[in-house]
Amino acid sequence: MHHAEVIELTSPCGADVTLFATEVRNWTLAEVPLAQADEVATFVTKKRRHEHLTGRWLLGKALIRWGVNDLSVVEVVRDERRAPSLVHIQGVWKRTPLPNFSITHSDGMVFLALADSTWSVGLDAEPLHRTLAENAYDLMAKGHELATLRTSPKHVFRAWTGKEAVQKCLGMGMHLNPREIEIPIEGNKVHITIENLKIQLDYWHSKGYHLSLAKRPSEPKELGPEERLLEETKLAMEADPDWGVGCKTQRQGA
């Protein structure tokens, strides 16, 4: 059994987003309720397995702090673009909104952003000591932004982590070309627009890392079969105060 520290970081977004960090450790599947054996089995390297399991472990600890007392009733699912989200498992008949989250790992650390369901978030981190070869700049930037980074390379990780955070916040990953995202470098808190979506982007240093956090109002999630039935039942009860009285009377008289 491992004993790991959950570090709560100061969020630049205030109460809207809670940030956590922990060191990467070699967890077992049995120690990580939110890990799925089929997904873990796809990782080729031990490093990737350890990072993934640590991220899921940290997510579980954060959810307990958030108020999810039973991790067995929730699971992490991925959409067609591999963007992860939390849902209640089928059969528990719960429709309480679950938080949105973003996980990133780098250089032996895992960072997690947890946000209310009304916000979509994306988080990325890179260690302060890391450098990036200039010939890699054109893989993530073009035009005026590329020229600016070449003349001011000290800002390269603000752009690098900012673009990653935006990709995650939009749930698109590398389906959104980083060269199509331009990150302003004049302030630590900026607002940008991508595909008509307004995104707040914060950049800061913590625990020896560059950190970028992107957030935007989230779009309503598609309801599953159980959630639709619960919603229809709720609407029927609101529309008719006497809804269900007959069933109650029958049970009492049985």
Image (cartoon, helix red, strand yellow):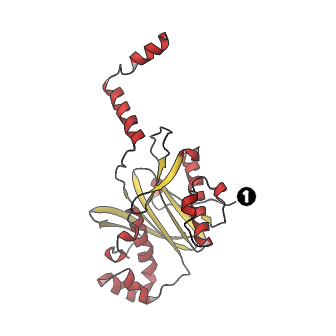
Is 235 drawn above or below residue 110 in the view shown?
Answer: above
Q: Residue at x 29, y 84 (%)?
A: 143
Describe residue 108's horizontal placement relative to residue 76 as left or right.
right
Q: Residue 185 occupies which quadrant of the picture?
A: bottom left
x%, y% of residue 182?
A: 33, 75
Q: Which residue lies most toward the left here?
A: 196
Is 79 drawn above or below residue 49 in the view shown?
Answer: above
Q: SS of the residue at dot 1? A: loop
x%, y% of residue 82?
A: 43, 62
User: Closest to the observer: 185 or 177?
Assistant: 177
Q: Residue 198 occupies which quadrant of the picture?
A: bottom left
Q: Residue at x 59, y 67 (%)?
A: 49
Q: Residue at x 54, y 66 (%)?
A: 42
Image quadrant in which the N terminus is located: bottom right
Describe residue 153's horizontal placement relative to residue 145 as left or right.
right
Q: Can residue 9 be seen in this view?
A: no
Q: Which residue lies most toward the top here?
A: 253
User: Closest to the observer: 33 or 149?
Assistant: 33
Is 147 drawn above or below residue 203 in the view shown?
Answer: below
Amino acid type at image mark 1: Met
Is 245 drawn above or below residue 72 in the view shown?
Answer: above
x%, y% of residue 207?
A: 58, 70
Q: Name the residue under label 1.
A: 1
Describe residue 171's horizontal placement relative to residue 71 as left or right.
left
x%, y% of residue 101?
A: 48, 57
